[in-house]
Amino acid sequence: MFKHYAPATLFLVALSLACIFFSLSTGSVSVSFIDTFKALMHSNSIDETSSEIIQNIRLPRVLSAFAIGGLLALSGVLMQVLLRNPLADPYIMGISGGAALGALIGLYFNLGATLGYLLASAGALISIALVFIIARGESQWSSNKLLLTGIVLAAGWGALITLILSISPAKPLKNMLYWLMGDLSFAHSFLPALLLLLCATVFCFFIARPMNILAQGDTDATLLGLDVPLLRKIIFILAALLTTSAVILGGTIGFVGLIIPHIMRLWKTGDHRWLVPASVLAGGSLLTIADTAARTLIAPQQLPVGAIMALIGVPLFLYLIRR
């Protein structure tokens, strides 16, 4: 299996590195590939301005974009297993809405980044608890209950978000709207996100076989000795954690978790031993390029990366539906 998918995996690794390097050298101030490499190596032969741009401005944002893309793609893989639907989305549980509502409350009252993160985390945790309790209920776990609960919760959070936006003063309103559309301008805490992505990828790779079995249906999984309720809880909690982390770091960015796992599945296979690492690498690469476009298309003005992803994702999603 590993020998069969090794060339494709190596290609995705090379593509990810190329996207990161290209994004580092591209921007409103152009830096050559050679100078970019020197800056990454902390060479003294590069001018101080270029070194500052690469190391302190672009590198944190580029790595944050890659981490967020990987988190969303991996969350999409997990949600598609949980709901047994190849077109399920990581935002379908309404968790992103809860996190967005908490973050907007922080922006509305100008509480600062730390309290904003805490409020976003609290909103996400409330959503997780509500979805988990309602979807579980008094009967067995139901994918339909999970789906419907998430949709209704997302609609409720959306209404509250609209209410906050409608009463917000003009000054913070632009920041709120940009954050809701996906904004990586302040996404500099890439180390925790990358660490979470690495740990989650390794963990999901080791439970790939149980996920393969679960994707075939609860009956077959139970007959093969799989603890279906426990695995569903693990997948649900992990998907919620990944989605929450991505939303807190970069706002609401759609389509990555929807289209990337599906494309990887169509390219090779639905085997999660391939699908997990491939989706992480491809999702990170896609969002890195999208964020590069967002900050360079009309530089020095920046566009919300969520809007760029929508422009990429909508036609691609329609093509996949056509397929």
Image (cartoon, rainbow, N blue to C red):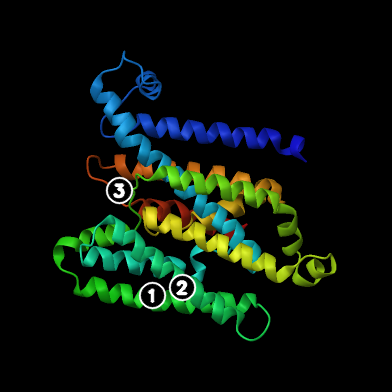
From where the camera sits, is residue 20 visible? yes
Residue 113 location (% of width, % of height): 28, 55
Left or right for 53, reference 24: left
Name the residue carrying label 1.
157
Name the residue carrying label 3.
186
Name the residue carrying label 2.
127
Q: Secondary structure at mark 3?
A: loop
Residue at 46% across, 57% down: 314
Q: Amino acid at mark 3?
A: Phe
Left or right for 118, reference 209: left
Residue at 34% across, 59% down: 117
Q: Amino acid at mark 2?
A: Ser
Residue extending farthest to the right is 223
Q: Quadrant of residue 291?
A: top left
Q: Nearer the viewer, residue 170 or 201?
A: 201
Q: Quadrant of the N terminus?
A: top right
Q: Which mark is residue 38?
A: none
Residue 236 location (% of width, % of height): 59, 66
